Amino acid sequence: MYKLCHCCMISVTLSQFRSQQSAYIAAVQREPVEITSRGAIPRAVLVSPEFYDRALRALEDQADIRAAFAARSEEGRVGHEDLMRELDL
């Protein structure tokens, strides 16, 4: 399971990553690995495929929640009972 705070992320320079790629790719299974260059400028963050999939699903869920909230606040929306009557159900 991943740690969620940025301060707990492994941070390595690009040259460190290049010299020990397999070790850092193994570490990605436990926590994200930030790759930096030129005085600690963040260039990339590596995560496991499972973490990426979970993060993508969470972002999609948030987008769905925002869309549902917006739909609820629209004027002229039809209530469930009215819809059922309109569809003869």
Image (cartoon, grey):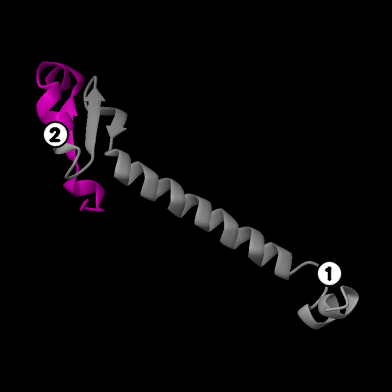
Q: Which quarter shows the C terminus?
A: bottom right
The image shows residue 38, relative to residue 56, as above or below, that is above
Pick whichever, 73 or 30, lies toward us. Answer: 30
Where residue 81 sits, quadrant-wise, is bottom right
Q: Position of residue 34 (x, y in %)?
A: 24, 33
Residue 75, label in figure = 1
Which residue is labeled 2 in the image? 26
Tell me which residue sits at (83%, 75%) in the image. Answer: 83
As drawn, 8 above or below 87: above
Which residues, given as a range, are shown in magenta? 1-25
Q: Cα distance, mark 1 to mark 2?
A: 52 Å
Query: Amino acid type of disc 1?
Result: Glu
Q: Is residue 83 left or right of residue 18?
A: right
Q: Identify the residue at horizontal 48%, vertical 51% (top origin).
A: 59
Q: Please, what secondary structure does the residue beneath circle 1 have?
A: loop
- From the viewer's perspective, is residue 60 above or below residue 29? below
x, y percent for residue 76 = 87, 70
Q: State the residue in front, 69 or 61.
A: 61
